[in-house]
Image (cartoon, rainbow, N blue to C red):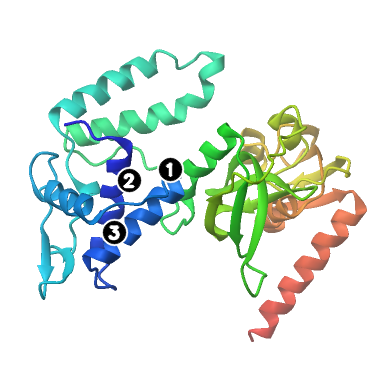
Amino acid sequence: MPINKNALIRYKVLDACLRNRQRKWTLDMLVDKVSDALHEYEGISKGASVRTIQYDIQMMRSDKLGYNAPIIVVEKKYYTYEDPKYSITNLPISHADMQQMSEAVELLKQFKGFEHFNNLNDVVQKLEDHVYSTSKKQPSIIHFEKNERLTGIHYLDVLYKAIQEKKGLSITYKSFKAESASIITFHPWWLKEYKNRWFLFGMKSDTILNLALDRILAIVTDEKIQYKPSQISSIDDYFRDVIGVTVSLNVRAENVRLWVDAGNAPYVETKPLHHSQQVLERNKDGSIIIGLKVQLNFELEREILGFGETMVVKSPERLRKRIISKTNSMRENYLDLN
């Protein structure tokens, strides 16, 4: 039985609530939670009715959707799963669904190797591995990097939709440095993933800003906001001169020269720090000197420090001094532990 989008949102929210045993969920609380989600994701202001949620619970309990959810009512009032490990997301994929997934993977695999579909390769590989491991009932062959503690990922849909429809947002945001949350009027432009974290780029007042999704507390689409579209023609051009997500529009890229020891030279050559990377010198001991043309930012410093003693900044001098200062502070911290 096909499920429409709103019903799927309701089922996912109910599933999350029923799995959360830190709270006791009454029917009214479930209605409120689902209504909030429908407003956040779909802009539906009328919310969900008690009758709708009762019907959803009945459907989840039944075999019509294949859920057979063990939903019980405790003390004739509180809803929960009888099995604390149960979730509708843990259900095995049906034979029909598996067949459709297999056909989809085979179709997508035809595009691998085409330049315009290069970014699909990782997605296809993940799907192919998941279909194989599920259909053969074998452990997954490929283990992809993931962040189990990643929060804010559920905002991707609503942000993607806001960007597509050019809608202004009212975002409740609390950075790691802030003592309290603030509400920001924001014009969303792009979404970017970097090192398993997602960032939203756009404009606040007249300033281009990036917001980490895991620091967003709430998002409301605000029709009263007159949307300001991006004046930057290309996302690729915007990020061209940086490593990471910290971009300074009025700062020029600089030539950076780095020494890399022999042990790490092959690694750095096959996994460049930046697309501008070039090998400038090859030394007899196997070490190399590479050149980058990038803005000097936090992410560049973190990459260099991550290589420890195997990478040294040759130039520019101010970057070299910053790394020296940080390594001196690191040394002092280690000595303080003694």
The three-letter amino acid code for the residue at tag 1 is: Glu
The three-letter amino acid code for the residue at tag 2 is: Ile
**Residue at point 35%, 54% (across, down):** 35
The three-letter amino acid code for the residue at tag 3 is: Val
Residue 141 vs 263, above or below: the answer is above
Residue 304: where, in percent of width, then height?
72, 52
Crowd rating for badge 3 (residues with CA inside 10 Å; few <14, some 14–19, many 20+): many
Q: CA distance from mark 3 to mark 1?
A: 16 Å
Residue 106 vs 317, above or below: the answer is above
Residue 9 bears which disc, if any? 2
Q: Is residue 130 left or right of residue 219?
A: left
Marks 1 and 2, the one that precedes in the sequence:
2
Residue 288: where, in percent of width, then height?
76, 39
Tell me if label 1 and label 2 are in contact, CB under 8 Å: yes
Q: In which quadrant will I find the C terminus? A: bottom right
> Which label sits in the foreground, 2 or 3?
3
What SS does tag 1 mark? helix
Which residue is identified by label 3? 31
Residue 181: where, in percent of width, then height?
61, 68
Judged from this view, the residue extending furthest toward the left is 63
Residue 165 bears which disc, if any? none
**Residue at point 23%, 42% (across, down):** 139
Residue 84 vs 272, above or below: the answer is below
Q: In which quadrant will I find the N terminus? A: top left
Q: Quadrant of residue 73?
A: bottom left
Residue 48: where, in percent of width, then height?
30, 51
Which residue is identified by label 1? 42
Judged from this view, the residue extending furthest toward the right is 317
